[in-house]
Structures are given as structure tokens and as C-alpha cells.
Amino acid sequence: FKSHTMDNVRVRRVCDELLHLEDPEHVLPDDKNLARDREGSLTAVPWMRTLQIATGKTVACLKMSNNPEVSIGGYFIISQMLSYIRGLVSLDLSSNGLTAAEARVLSLGLKGNRSVQDLSLRENQIGSEGATSIAEMLKVNHTLMHLDIRTNSIRGNGVCVLADSMSENPCLTQLDVRWNYAGESSDFVECALMDLKKFCSRNMQRALEAFRTIQEKEEMEQWGATGGSGAPSGVPETV
């Protein structure tokens, strides 16, 4: 969506239509757009007509950055959508003027989300309080892999809370906290940053090991299906 084109009403329509796209039983609100047909009569039409040809499919990426007109009510609607949607993989809410309260609302929906892997909240104003809400979400969210919270006025204590939460998170492989903690160079901030890097590296290693295990299993199954001729990739042949 283009900059400065979204407000709470449009956010509600977007969320409803995305849910309806995945589940036709999700009821759309009654306040649809009205258009005049050739006879001059007003008829209800979907707000995003292009989505109607894709019923039963999903939208993987939603970019809603640079829309500061959306308030906490709109983020409450997005949070509710995140609790139910299954196909959304990437969500961009950067440069929207998000505060700590709005970060807390979004975190509630992300706690139960099982699809979003990439989340951008950069260039907002969530502060350390908002970072604390995100940290609580990271303790229970096992889907998110990339989180961008650059330039959010997060102080050292917020970075430390994030580092503590990462000890319980098995999936996040990249957490970008650059251009925060301005003017702070304390040892505890440096230790927290090192811990964040360590936990992200640990999760990346786990992800690579899991991928290798799946790949080896698929190769073994394929090798067995071909009658066992030769040796599967990565397994040396015996002479």
C-alpha cells in the first residue's frame, strides 16, 4: 500500500478481505464500497477486487509502511488478524509512528501467530517499553525468523530484556537493533549485544542442522525408491 493511504477503516477492510481470501466462511463487513452499475443502481462491490480471483489462496507479503494515520485501533485489528491468518509470511509496518502501546497490541497477536517469519518495525518510537512487549512475545513465538527494530529509541535496558528473552527463543536468526541506545556505551549494553548475536547464531546453526536432516532423509527415501542403486548423496560407497 502506498504511503499515507491507510487509516483504521481501510486497515479493517484489508484484514477482513485477507481472512476471507483464506477462509470464504469469514464474513465480510456490511460497509462495502458502493458503485453504480450500468442501470444507475448502487451495488456493493469488494474493496480489493483483484483479490477476488484468488479465492482459496493466500497473500504472503503485506507492506503497510509510512502510514502514520493508522492508530492503536487499527493495530488492534491487525493483531486480531495475526491470531488467525495462516498464509502471511512477511509484514512491514516501518515508519508508522508506532508507540510502546501499539507494539504491545501487536505482540499479543504475534504470540499466537504461526506464519509470519519476517517482521519490520524499523523507524518507529516503541522505546524500551515496546521492546519489553516484543521480548515477551519472542519467548512464545516459534515462527519469526527475522525482526527489524532499527531506530526505535530503545535504550540499554530494552536491549538487555531482548537478550534475556532470546535464551528461550529457538527460531529467530536475525534481530536488527542498530541505531538505538544512543549515547550508551556501558558494559552491560555491549554484553547484551554480544548475547543477541550469540543466540541468533545458535538458532541459525540449529536451522541449518534441521535442514540437512530433512534433506538427508529425502535423499534416503529417494534412494530407496530407486531400488538402492548407488549411494545417496553424502554417503560414501563401499568397495
Image: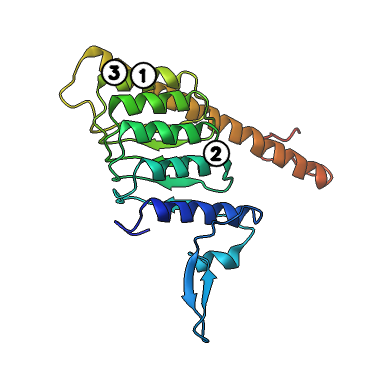
User: Compared to 160, does 50 lie above or below?
Assistant: below
Q: Could you say which is closer to the camera, residue 68 or residue 220?
A: 68
- For label 1, the residue is 161
User: Which amino acid, by three-letter code, is at mark 2?
Assistant: Ser
User: Compared to 49, does 211 lie above or below?
Assistant: above
Q: Is residue 39 left or right of residue 6?
A: right
For marks 1 and 2, give the one nearer the viewer.
2
Secondary structure at badge 3 equals: helix
The quadrant in which residue 214 appears is top right
Q: Are marks 3 and 1 in contact (CB under 8 Å)?
A: yes
Residue 103 rendering spot, x and y as whole percentages:
37, 34
Q: Which mark is residue 83?
A: 2
Does residue 77 appear in this view?
yes
Sooner in the amino-acid sequence: mark 1 or mark 2: 2
Q: Quadrant of the N terminus?
A: bottom left
Q: Residue at x 49, y 51 (%)?
A: 15
